[in-house]
Amino acid sequence: MSILYGIFFALRQLLTSEGFPPKPQFEEKDVPDLSGKVVFPLFHAREYMRPNLPIVYLITGGAGGIGFELVKILYSKNANVYIAGRSSDNAIAAVNKIREEYPKSDGGLAFLQLDLSDLTSIKPAVDKFLQKERRLDAVVHNAGIMITPTHWRTVQGWDIQFGTNVIGPFVLQRHLQNILVETAKIAPKNSVRTVFLSSISAPLAPPGGIDYKNLESKGVSAFSAIQYFDSGLKYAHSKCANTIMAMGFAQKFKDTGIIAVSANPGNLNTDLLRHSLIAWVFFRPWLYPARYGAITELYATLSPEINDTSNGALIIPWGRTGPIRQDILDSCQEGGAVKFWDWLDENTQGF
Ligand SMILES: NC(=O)c1ccc[n+]([C@@H]2O[C@H](COP(=O)([O-])OP(=O)(O)OC[C@H]3O[C@@H](n4cnc5c(N)ncnc54)[C@H](OP(=O)(O)O)[C@@H]3O)[C@@H](O)[C@H]2O)c1
Ligand SMILES: *[C@@H]1O[C@H](CO)[C@@H](O)[C@H](O)[C@H]1NC(C)=O
């Protein structure tokens, strides 16, 4: 697999289906009441064991960009939503804004402080969450960063993009696993979800998707001698890893009833491009309002079209299943994706 094929694949998707998506088929208006007090009409009523616990969602990076728009939609439908993120100031501002916009909502908004680039912050945050909640219907690993300076590292020394986009979310997922498993036992079939965020750039990842050699250096060693491209390739590697994580999760935990997908939300006008003027200039013509990205995430989180047949799928804008580069798919067969999941587990022990 040459990098040229990856560029061709990504460009083709950018110039067609993923850059110019058809109209969304699953939007706010299609979302039922999410308080947990009313029977979920999208799912067969017979399957619904009425829980006394309210429905709960956790969205990382929910104070800004796409995540903020998703939190808004869920809260407007009376859901209880946790925003997980670094900055309490940003979260408080976001919560106030949303409450003002939806004064009639019966839902809840709460902030969970954690920094995905510091693994020591994750378990304490989840412990706080678990003190308050006994149910978690979906976690959307939305927080992420893109094309940051190549010398940036996480607290534990990972490349900042791989660390924030992959390693941190993995550790968060591990700590949330039990409550998701327990929720899947009482919630409607296929409604408990784990969503990882991918990107149109994922096809630029190395052959097979994961470069284990590169990861021996915690993702720090360079893919390219040109710093800017190196950072872009590291972003692509991390986002492809997010897609493989979803497949690994789906394969490894298929018996838990939890559905995992990855989602390319589309190309949205958010703060994500703040570190890269070149990417901003290149992507500017393709950028849509952030709300559209939230519609893709909404589909991944709630659409009843997603069931065990689409477990591990890649969702593309604005809510459909999309193609994954063939050699990446091949590498995920026969336990290949589980291998990556287990690799993550081994390499994050102690957190
Ligand atoms: N926008 C797009 O076109 C696009 C395209 C493809 C994929 N995506 C993916 O979509 C996701 C959301 O992106 P966005 O466009 O909404 O970006 P954004 O506007 O930059 O928002 C990202 C969020 O992640 C949070 N975050 C960053 N680093 C964090 C850390 N170490 N710990 C905890 N939270 C952290 C940020 O919080 P702070 O306030 O603390 O910075 C912010 O709330 C990302 O995973 C991105 O890769 C976006
Ligand atoms: C699973 O979803 C697919 C696509 O939405 C659908 O065609 C299929 O009938 C569903 N299967 C079940 C068992 O509900």
Image: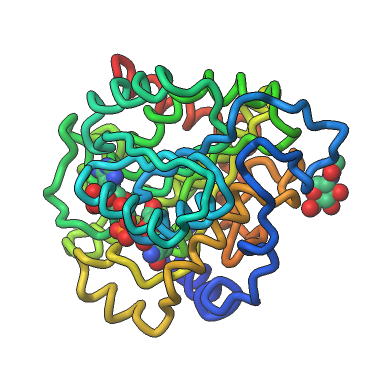
Q: Left or right: 261 with respect to 43? A: left
Picture quarter containing residue 131?
A: top left
**Image location of residue 19, percent across then percent down:** 52, 76
**Image location of residue 111, percent across then percent down:** 33, 38
- The residue under the point 79% across, 43% down is 43
- The residue under the point 65% across, 24% down is 52
How many marks overall? Answer: 0
**Image location of residue 46, percent across then percent down:** 87, 32
Q: Is residue 31 visible?
A: yes
Question: Hey, which residue is sitting farthest right in the picture?
Answer: 46
In front of the other: 154 or 66: 66
- The residue under the point 43% across, 80% down is 286
Q: How is the image coloured?
A: rainbow
Q: Left or right: 269 with respect to 107? A: left
Question: Hey, which residue is sitting farthest bottom in the picture?
Answer: 285
Quadrant placement of the C terminus = top left
Q: Eyeballing the image, is 315 above or below 50?
A: below
In front of the other: 136 or 308: 136
**Image location of residue 244, percent across then percent down:** 51, 42
Q: Left or right: 133 with respect to 60? A: right
Q: Eyeballing the image, is 217 above or below 276?
A: above
In front of the other: 217 or 242: 242
Q: Eyeballing the image, is 225 above or below 132?
A: below
Q: Is residue 237 visible?
A: no
- The residue under the point 68% across, 28% down is 254
Question: Hey, which residue is sitting farthest top in the picture?
Answer: 350
Picture quarter containing residue 182?
A: top right
